[in-house]
Image: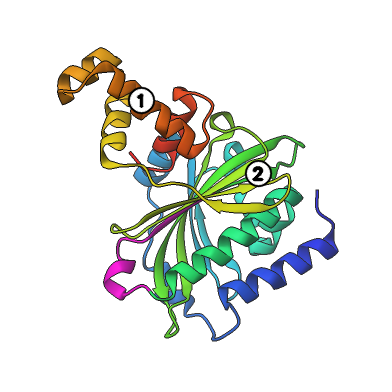
Amino acid sequence: MLTNNKSIFALAEFRRIWKSDFIESEIAEVKEFLQDSPLLIETLSLRNSSLAIIDLRRMTYLCCIGDTVPICGWDKKYFLEGGVGFFLSKMLPADLEGFRQMSEITTNYVRPLTDEAMKSFKSFIDLQVVGEDGKINRVLHEGVSLKRDPDGNITFMLALISNITNLKRDNRQHLRLTDATQNLIFEINNTDNSCRQLEKLSERELQIARLTGKKLTSEEIAKALFISVHTVNTHRQNMLRKLDMADTMELLNFLTAYQVI
């Protein structure tokens, strides 16, 4: 677990990345984006997810909906009281560094986007959090922009947090950025903190991944696409290589969780 000094340093670093001290926030304006409803809470519970609005200029959570305990091991009151600083303080040190790098990549990606492109913008980042009981949970942070400042920096973000502990191997994190025209995936190696952009999957590979996810066999996919079984298997092996996945199950879990398919 991180020390208080490390937490303060981390918060200052993230404020710098997100340009969060530029202007005061209009909290009342942003809260109108989201209403607490029983149906929403039920939906989030079924998805093992929680929803929050983040003020990136003040590094605070304006609201948090859903039960956060099974997701990251902490009650939402801690996030509302402690803000982003509390969240950062519960990350594993290696994942915190990865999160810092991925936040930097995200802000550089977002700034030049047009307002129209931002309507389709989504970011996906995974990280590990130490819960109150000492258990390590891997969560997926899916973010969309609610508002930007004149320089293109996101000031308010809507975040969906889900538990994906059983879906990924340790020692690496992933970032996916998309604005409907681009689909970029980055990998952080938590052992040496190196970052690399992964090779893009082709439309045919994505097509085969979707059909595989529907439980079709290689023979059935080949018949549906009018290609050979050998070609289907070659595409599948190429996907494993490009994304550095151990097997088809890990590949499908990743592509589904990150909404690539």
**Front-most of residues 208 and 241:** 241
Give residue 46's position: percent from left, percent from top.
42, 33
Disc 1 designates what residue?
234
- Residue 78 visible in this rendered orientation of the protein: no
- Residue 255 visible in this rendered orientation of the protein: yes
Disc 1 secondary structure class: helix
Residue at 60 percent across and 51 percent down: it is 76
Residue 131, placed above or below residue 11 = above
The boundaries of the magenta stretch are 113-125
Q: Quadrant of the C terminus?
A: top left
Give residue 237's position: percent from left, percent from top.
42, 27
Give residue 61's position: percent from left, percent from top.
56, 63
**Front-most of residues 45 and 176:** 176
Which mark identifies residue 128?
2
The type of residue carrying mark 2 is Gln
Give residue 220's position: percent from left, percent from top.
22, 15
Q: Is residue 74 left or right of residue 27?
A: right
Question: Dot 1, how many residues are within 10 Å of its Cα: few (below 14), some (14-19), or many (20+)?
Answer: few
Residue at 46 percent across and 72 percent down: it is 154
Choose mark 2 or mark 1, whichever is in front. 1
Question: Dot 2, how many residues are within 10 Å of its Cα: few (below 14), some (14-19), or many (20+)?
Answer: many
Q: Is residue 160 left or right of residue 137?
A: left
The type of residue carrying mark 1 is Thr
Residue at 84 percent across and 65 percent down: it is 5
